[in-house]
Every structure is written in C-alpha cells, then in structure tokens.
C-alpha cells in the first residue's frame, strides 16, 4: 500500500512522493490493519519536524485507496505550511484543508493503475469515485437542512424529528430506488452522521471543499502543470489568508451559485460518461 501510494504520488509530482517517502523513513505511516486498531484514517501535523503522521486501518479495499491518497493530500499540505513563520499560520480553514485532500483523490485517478492491475476493476473504482463525488452533495444538503431544523427547534419531540427527517430526506433523494422494507432504518439514517452530534453546522464545509476540488481537477484536465502549481500556491499560504483569498490563489471561483455548481457537475458527468463507455466497450 505504502509503496504503491508513493509511486502514484511521484507520477503526479516527484515532490509529493518525496514527502511520503520521508514520512515512511521516519516511521510516520501507520497504515495496516491490526487487532484492536480503530477504524478510519487521519493525518496529524507535527509542528517540530514538519513531517506529519498518517494513521489508518487499511485492509485492501477501494476505500483504502481513496483514504490513502486523501490523507496524502493532507500530508502535502502540512509539509507546504511547515516553513510558515508562526504556528497559527499552519492552521487553516477546514474547507481548504479538504480541497487539498479531495483534489488529490481526483488528481491521482489517472495513475490508479498502480493499485488496480485489472482494467475492469480500475474502471469500476473510478466510476465509484465519481459517483461518490456526485452523491455527496444531496447528502450534505439533507444533513445541513436537517441540522438547522434540529438545533433551531430544541423543543421538538422524537415523532416530529422523524417526520422532519423523512420529509427532508425525500426532498433530496431520488424516487427511483425502492426502499420498501427498510423504512425503520431510513427513519434513523441521520444517526450515522457523527457531525450532527459532535460538530453541528460543520458538514457544509465538505460541500464547499468538494466544489473546490472539482474545480482544480477541471484545471488539471486542461493544463496539469498549471493546476498543480495553483494547488501548491494556495496550500503554501496555510492560514495566512481568508478562505475566498485561498480559493483565488488556486484560481478557483468562490461562488456557490447554481450556475457555477451545474457547470462543475456537468464536467464530472462527462468524465463519468467516458469511464462508463470504456467499461462497456
Ligand atoms: Zn480530510
């Protein structure tokens, strides 16, 4: 897993591979599954050495590939901010932190043959990745709308809560899937989103970041070198600028109008269609 990730990131830009190589030499990559290890993955910046630590619980699934390159993006961000003068500058808004990681997921896709030798599996992995990039938005909208109701109506009963959840869920879900027999589970589906309990009003950040990541990927498809330069320039600023300025440094629009979002989603759809075509041919 480690060598493959390093190879994949090196193909994108040797500096990216060097960062992970350094972490590996320092023993800062704790990736493989072992008994009792917590699930998930994260990148922990370490202020003194500048080389962060990645913890994850890899078991050879597709999710592990995306988690690894995702955390790799966070790690590159940590390296880029290490030389900033104040520790406070090395802390940046979550939205730009997730642009670093989510854009890395999309940038690396063209080199995922490192992880998947079977062309059909490779196409399926890319297809699933792009489906996730699309379906995350209605889910974010559902969670965000629900939590606004939840926290601004603290006196609600559990019956009212369930009714509100089901109505919002229907608003943002497609009616084409038949969920008959699963009503009991659908009614409590919101409980799987820990942000509702731990960090209210935070979940929308992922949507902002995902749009930034798609924008960078679109730049990458037109001009890979320039897109990577824009990525590096924005991330190197750490937390010395505001979020709109950081987006601007990456030549990204800080605009969430339906016109801009629909253009970005049209781009993702055209990429998805190309993958599907390859699979069926
Ligand atoms: Zn992340």
Image (tube, rainbow, N blue to C red):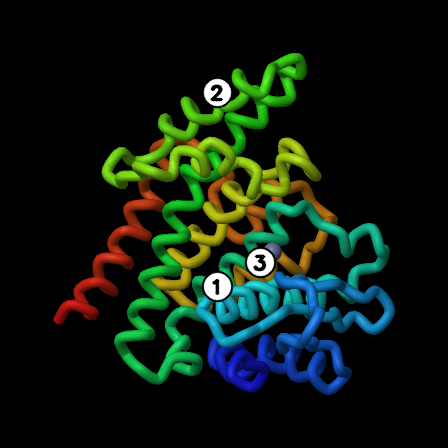
Disc 3 and disc 2: Cα gap in Å?
35 Å
Task: Give the mark toward the camera: 2 or 1.
Answer: 2
Q: What residue sits 12% from the left and 71% below the top?
A: 281
Position of residue 217 measured from the top left corner of the image (x, y, whole percent) = 42, 58
Q: Is residue 65 left or right of residue 50?
A: left
115 over 175 or under it: above or below: below
Regarding mark 1 in the picture, which secondary structure is present there? helix
Ligand 1's image quarter is bottom right
Position of residue 206 measured from the top left corner of the image (x, y, whole percent) = 54, 45
Residue 164, labelled with which disc? Answer: 2
Disc nearer the start of the sequence (3/2): 3
Q: Quadrant of residue 234?
A: bottom right
Disc 2 and disc 1: Cα gap in Å?
34 Å
Please give the residue where the numbered disc 1 appears in the rendered image: 105
Q: What residue sits 57% from the left and 38% below the top?
A: 191
The answer as to whether callout 2 falls within 8 Å of ligand 1 is no
Disc nearer the start of the sequence (2/1): 1
Task: Give the mark toward the camera: 3 or 2.
Answer: 2
Disc 3 and disc 1: Cα gap in Å?
9 Å
Disc nearer the start of the sequence (3/1): 3
Q: What residue sits 58% from the left and 23% below the top?
A: 148
Residue 100, labelled with which disc? Answer: 3
Q: Nearer the viewer, residue 236 or 124?
A: 124
Regarding mark 2 in the picture, which secondary structure is present there? helix
């Amino acid at each position: 897993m480690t060598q493959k990730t390093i190879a994949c990131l090196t193909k994108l830009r040797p500096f990216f591979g060097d960062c992970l190589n350094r972490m590996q030499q320092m023993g800062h990559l704790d990736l493989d599954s072992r008994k009792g290890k917590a699930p998930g993955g994260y990148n922990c910046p370490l202020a003194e050495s500048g080389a962060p630590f990645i913890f994850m619980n890899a078991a050879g699934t597709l999710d592990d590939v995306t988690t690894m390159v995702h955390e790799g993006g966070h790690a590159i961000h940590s390296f880029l901010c290490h030389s900033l003068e104040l520790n406070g500058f090395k802390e940046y808004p979550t939205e730009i932190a997730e642009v670093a990681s989510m854009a890395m997921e999309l940038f690396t896709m063209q080199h995922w043959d490192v992880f998947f030798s079977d062309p059909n599996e490779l196409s399926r992995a890319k297809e699933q990745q792009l489906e996730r990039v699309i379906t995350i938005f209605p889910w974010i909208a559902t969670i965000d709308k629900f939590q606004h109701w939840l926290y601004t109506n603290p006196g609600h009963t559990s019956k009212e809560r369930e009714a509100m959840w089901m109505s919002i869920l229907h608003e943002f879900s497609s009616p084409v899937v038949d969920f008959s027999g699963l009503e009991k589970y659908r009614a409590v589906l919101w409980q799987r989103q820990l942000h509702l309990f731990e960090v209210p009003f935070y979940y929308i950040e992922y949507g902002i970041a995902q749009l930034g990541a798609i924008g960078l990927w679109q730049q990458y498809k037109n001009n890979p070198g320039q897109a990577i330069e824009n990525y590096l320039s924005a991330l190197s600023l750490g937390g010395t600028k505001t979020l709109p300025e950081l987006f601007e440094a990456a030549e990204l629009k800080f605009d969430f109008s339906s016109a801009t979002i629909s253009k970005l989603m049209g781009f993702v759809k055209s990429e998805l269609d190309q993958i599907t075509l390859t699979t069926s041919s």
